[in-house]
Image (cartoon, helix red, strand yellow):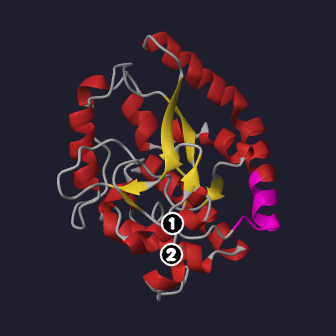
Amino acid sequence: MFAPQESMRSEESCLLEQPLQTAEGTLTRRNRRGGSFAGSRIAESIPLPECLGTPWWKRGCDIVGASLLLCLLLPFLVAIACYIRIVSKGPALFFQRRVGEGGKHFNIIKFRTMDVRPEATAEHRVYVERLTSQDAPIEKPDHTNRIIPGGNFLRRNSIDEFPQLLNVLMGTMSLVGPRPDLLEIEDYQPWQLRRFEVLPGMTGLWQVSGKNRLTFREMIQLDIQYVEARSFALDLRILLKTFSVVVQQDND
């Protein structure tokens, strides 16, 4: 639909020779010979692609678009926050560490849709390994027993992601871009790291091309196609398609 470029650069042309240094330390790959899992700092260094930067038109659209949406949706967002506080103990917002442009860590902001409990490391690791499987469809982990009243509605319609407009204003995300990623990028193959060349987005090619019906590999390929073909026209098409998808979900 969006006619992105089909070809992908070779691994040698898009990867740097040295590992990326961030405030969190060197981003590394998991030791496949038996090293313990400890997030993104373990054994072999992962060289990451060079950042492409954010064009002036894209940053301008992000600021204007996010500001307008926040102003229009503010009463609705406040009502949702109050509802969450009423039906469940704990804060209305949920913060989770993700990997963004250039491998930098940031806190993604969402409405909380589950009870406040410590996340089980083993359970999360099983989910990550399934997610990164080439043949597994993308789906959220099953936390049915933890979902607050109305939480499924918020998640099904992506309303829980509206607070990410604040991420857009802060410059850690864009309205359109690759999917914001979990910290476990040590499971990535080198060619998949190209998605970190640009800011992650609230929506993107994968969200409007099947989302949960796609496999992890297909999602990565769509993200990289966006990186190669991004333009004002493509961003506009994705935003319009996102609105269409949300309306269609409401009618289903």
Residue 1 visible, this angle? no
Quick one: 116 or 243, which is closer to the camera? 116
Q: Is residue 2 left or right of residue 193?
A: right
Please report the residue visible at 41 percent of the width from the left and 26 percent of the height from the top: 150
Image x and y of residue 40, in percent: 40, 48
What's the CA distance linking mark 1 and mark 2?
6 Å
Main SS of the magenta part reads: helix
Image x and y of residue 129, in percent: 24, 52
Residue 190 falls within the magenta-colored stretch: no
Please report the residue visible at 22 percent of the width from the left and 53 percent of the height from the top: 130
Task: Give the residue type at disc 1.
Answer: Leu
Q: Is residue 41 above or below residue 166?
A: below
Please tell me how crowded label 2 is: few (under 14), some (14-19), or many (20+) other residues with Cα within 10 Å. some
Query: Residues at badges 1 and 2 in contact (C-beta under 8 Å)?
Result: yes
Numbered disc 2: secondary structure: loop
- The number of discs equals 2
First in sequence: mark 1 or mark 2? 2
Q: In the orientation shown, which residue stands out farthest toward the left?
A: 34
Task: Please give the residue where the numbered disc 1 appears in the rendered image.
Answer: 48
Q: Is residue 93 above or below residue 13?
A: above
Image x and y of residue 22, in percent: 58, 50
Numbered disc 1: secondary structure: loop
Task: Please give the residue where the numbered disc 2 appears in the rendered image.
Answer: 15
Q: Image quadrant of residue 60?
A: bottom right
Quick one: 229 or 172, which is closer to the camera? 172
Q: Image quadrant of residue 228?
A: bottom right
Please tell me how crowded label 1 is: few (under 14), some (14-19), or many (20+) other residues with Cα within 10 Å. many
Please report the residue visible at 65 percent of the width from the left and 23 percent of the height from the top: 78
Give the residues in magenta.
53-62
Q: Is residue 233 left or right of residue 123?
A: right
